[in-house]
Amino acid sequence: MCRQATFAKENHRSMNIKPFITVPLAALVLLACKSKTNENMSTLNLTQEWDKTFPKSELVNHSKVTFHNRYGIELAADMYVPKNADGKLPAIAVSGPFGAVKEQSSGLYAQHMAERGFLTIAFDPSFTGESGGEPRRMASPDINTEDFLAAVDFLSTCGLADPERIGIIGICGFGGMAVNAAALDPRIKATVASTMYDMSKVNVEGYFASEDTPAQRQEKRRALAAQRTKDYASGTYERAGGVVDPLPEDAPWFVKDYHAYYKTPRGYHKRSGNSNDGWNIIGCQSFLNQPLLAWAGEIENPVLLIHGEKAHSRYFSEYAFERMTGRHVEGVSAVEGNKEIMIIPGASHVDLYDDVAGVIPYDKIEQFFKTNL
C-alpha cells in the first residue's frame, strides 16, 4: 500500500472472454458472456495454471475472463461459478487488498461466496496484476472506483448473472473504493467492505492523524512534486517498496502482520506489489485531494462494514459508518437502518485477509447478500 512506504522500501460493449475453462461450463460461459473483438483493446497475458495462495475448491468451476472500464483499460478477473448452477445467479465482484492481486485475498473471498451459491469474479485493478494499464503500479481514486463499476457492467451483461442482483466486496484499501462505488452506482444493490482502509484519509492525515496539519500536507505535496520531476527526467517511475523485508525489530506490530502475510508462503505472490517492490512513489498522489467518502451519506442500498477489534485500521470503518449514518461508534458492532458495522472480537487487520485465523464471517456475508440481492 502507498502508505506502507513510510515503513517500507509498494468500444463500449466489447469484452473478451478467455476460454481457459473446462467443458461443459466453457460453452455455457462463452455463449452467456459472448464478446466481440475490439481492435483497440490490448491482449492480456493470462496464466492458465492455478497459481493462487489458497487451494482450489471442488465445489465451483473456475475460468479467466476479461472486461474493460470506461477508460479503455482491460481488466483481468477470475470467475467462480457454483457447480450445477441453474438459472441466472446473484453476482458479486471482489477486489483488494490495495497493492494485492486476485490470487490473494479477493480470490479467496470470491471462491468462498461461489461455494455458497453466488457467481463471483475477483479482479485485478487497473495498472496491477494481470490487468492492463500503463504505467504499472499507479493508483487512482477515480479509476479504481471505476474498476468496480466496470465489473458491474460486465456482470450486468453476462447471461449467467441476474443484473438486478449484483453486489461488491472491497478488501482493505478497496473497501474504501467499494463504498465510493456504492455511492456512485445504484446498480450495486449491496456492498461489503472488509478490514477497510480509506486511502484518502490515510494519505491526507497519516496513520492515526499523525500528519494532519497543513504544513505536513504541504511537505508531502513538495516531496511528490519533486519526485515527479525526477521520474520524468529519468524516464522511469521509482518504486516505493512493498512490505519491508527484512523486518526491523522496531517495526509497528501491524507492519509485522503485513510481513507475515505478504512476505511468507502464506500470502506471497509474484505479481503482488505488496509482496515485492510496491507502488510507484507518486502512485497515490491524487488521494491527497480527492476524498473517497464524501458522498457516503447518500448511499441508499445496504452496506456491511467488517473489521477486527484489534486492527490498527478499525477507525477507517468506524469513520465510514459515521459518514453513512451520522452515528459515531468505537470498538462495537452497530446497526443503523440498512448500514451495519460488524466488529470481530480479537481479530487484527490481516486476520481478515485469509483463513489462517478462521475469523472471516462468511456466514454473515452470505446472509447479508442473500437478504439484499
Image (spheres, rainbow, N blue to C red):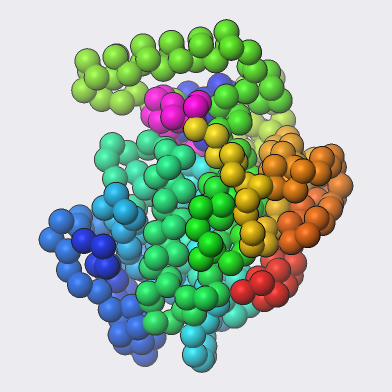
User: Magenta residues, as a range?
Assistant: 271-289
Residue at the image position 35 percent from the left and 44 percent from the top: 127
Residue at the image position 62 percent from the left and 47 percent from the top: 296
Position of residue 200 measured from the top left corner of the image (x, y, whole percent): 56, 33
The quadrant in which residue 224 appears is top left
| Rendered view: 234 above or below 194 | above
- Judge from the rendering whether residue 215 lies leftward or rightward of residue 126; answer left or right: right
- Judge from the rendering whether residue 280 lies leftward or rightward of residue 109; answer left or right: left
Position of residue 126 measured from the top left corner of the image (x, y, whole percent): 37, 47
Q: Nearer the viewer, residue 226 or 295?
A: 295
Is 77 magenta? The answer is no
**Residue 195 at least partly seen:** no
Quadrant into which the C terminus falls: bottom right
| Rendered view: 86 above or below 34 | below
Position of residue 130 measured from the top left corner of the image (x, y, whole percent): 34, 53
Residue at the image position 33 percent from the left and 55 percent from the top: 69
Is 275 magenta? The answer is yes
| Rendered view: 191 above or below 114 | above
Position of residue 344 measured from the top left corner of the image (x, y, whole percent): 80, 52
Residue at the image position 29 percent from the left and 45 percent from the top: 133
The quadrant in which residue 323 appears is top right
